[in-house]
Amino acid sequence: MLNGGVRLKPAETTISPARSRPAPAMAGLFAPLEMLLSGGGDPRLTINPASGLNEYGCQPFPCPETLSFSSSTATSISQRAWDRAQKSREGLMQSAIAMGIEDAFDARIEAMRDELRFALGLPRALADVVFSPSGTDSQLQALFLAKTLLGNELTTVVVAADQTGSGTAHTSRGCHFSAATANGNRVQKGEPIEGLGGPAKSIALPLFDAAGQVRPEAASDAMVFDAVERAIAGGSRVLLQVMDASKFGWRAPSDQCLDAIMARWGKQVQVVVDACQMRLGRARLKDYLAHGYMVLITGSKFFTGPPFSGALILPASLARILDSTAELPCGLFEYVSRSDWPRSWSKLRERFPVRMNFGQWLRWEAAIEEIAAYYRVPDAFRQLALSSFGHAVEARIAASSSLELLPWQERTAEADDEELAQRTIFSFVIRRGDRIRTLDECKGLYRALAGTAAGSNRSSPNAPPCLIGQPVALGNGSSPAAALRISAGARLVSESWSPDQSIASRNLDRVACDIGMAIADLERLNSELNMPNSGEMSHAG
């Protein structure tokens, strides 16, 4: 079992199927902090000994020398968050001496639920929080709960399926999405999870057409409405996974389409919102819950916590139904722990195994620190910092002869989106001559920019390593074109803020210079670099 990155022998991890041995668990807490932060997730968190980086190009400790515009994919931990994780571990050690490691860990996770709700402006009476190692794991939780509410004859309709994590193709059908779970159990990727998969069906609705163009809103809405109608006409209930926001920052379907679906089939449809990018306002998040929707979130995209921290936010009104009626699929035991679930769900919790995923916990400690720091910044400066970032990126790309900004889905400046009504993900293609770079070529550029490609030259003091969002394919085919992404994250705001206006202004100017440096280096690499073998990359960004 992987317990915060420390692999323990099976005989040392269990007394019974429901409990873990306290002594080895306590010992695991003394592992190096960077090891704990890299554990309890999936193989994408594994650190390459040669580079010191995980599959996202991130480090499990602060690396301020790296330019980071990669919040649409993943970000290395900040010093602030590292310090919070260190302090939290010390606090748990002290609590464990007084009350035992299992009780101390469970109490800390329960307290974090309140901290996360408070940071996101969610009243306890409105929202329950179910933690998980990743947004993909949270999709399995959502499927389990949707089956409890609607029955086993369920079809998952995934909107913008080409803009979500690669694991969704499996989780939407109740199947294993990796060769190992976050708890270290070996499973068969793509095979049904016992008791959860099987009858589950899935319909994938891409946001882009075969030519790599975004479908018009009316066409996309019609496709979603028709898919729900066909599934229900065929005798199925529907788990409708909508997108807010995609890898490119898009939202689908429209609010009007969603309202029409719920007005017609509300009792036969459960909506789950993929908000894993967390590029939506707190008021909008609250509105989703008030409508009875489940919401998938992470602390590791916009909020720049370390990669792999997921949660399912549920309307608290569902607790009374789900706690007493849920029948547990035995295969789900591989993915969940008792402490993931709210203490108020007493009947459901007592059937889950007692485990302590230290990696998941510490990554959420770090993420909550980033969320709280972001919202401590005055509203006006959050708006200013994000708009300043956007103007800098747009101006620099507009001046480039090889980079071309892709269109963005304009949003009305509605109060429920706050400062996140504006664009924070800037997707662009790269031209070489008269053609657009392919996915494989963009992988090579991405890796060279980050300094992880074999033979890449990162020795110039004017070209520090730089992380941007991983390339995303546009359309289908054997060698599709692709886009890269420069993204604003919460840390841009919290680290630029100062009550001294002149200091804050200089901080934003420095960010603009960093953007210019990153784009100039990307242009240089595009014109000079012979593409190396791009190797394998994650598509979960």
Image: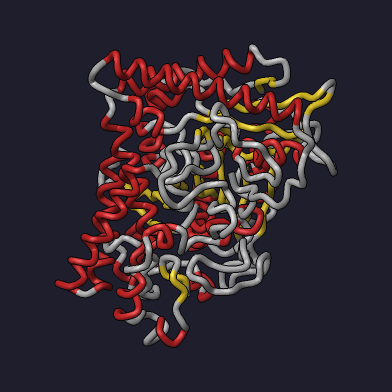
> Residue 393, how many percent across, how many down?
55, 19
On the rendered structure, is 495 left or right of 531?
A: left
Q: Residue furthest left?
A: 98
Q: Residue at x 58, y 37 (%)?
A: 469
Is residue 250 in view from this perspective? no
On the rendered structure, is 456 left or right of 131?
A: right
**How many marks do you count on the picture?**
0
Q: Residue at x 83, y 21 (%)?
A: 433
Q: 526 or 460: which is nearer to us?
A: 460
Q: Quadrant of residue 474?
A: top right
Q: Residue at x 29, y 59 (%)?
A: 109
On the rendered structure, is 307 left or right of 44?
A: left
Q: Residue at x 32, y 68 (%)?
A: 30
> Residue 516, how many percent across, how many down?
55, 20
Q: 14 or 195: which is nearer to us?
A: 14
> Residue 355, how many percent across, how many down?
38, 72
> Residue 282, how many percent across, how many down?
36, 34
Q: Quadrant of residue 32?
A: bottom left
Way the structure is coloured: secondary structure
Q: 294 or 363: which is nearer to us?
A: 363
Is 68 located above or below residue 166 in the figure? above
Is 253 located above or below residue 498 in the figure? below
Is 411 located above or below residue 308 in the figure? above
On the rendered structure, is 246 left or right of 162?
A: left
Which quarter of the rendered picture does the C terminus lie within? top right
Q: 256 or 3: which is nearer to us?
A: 3
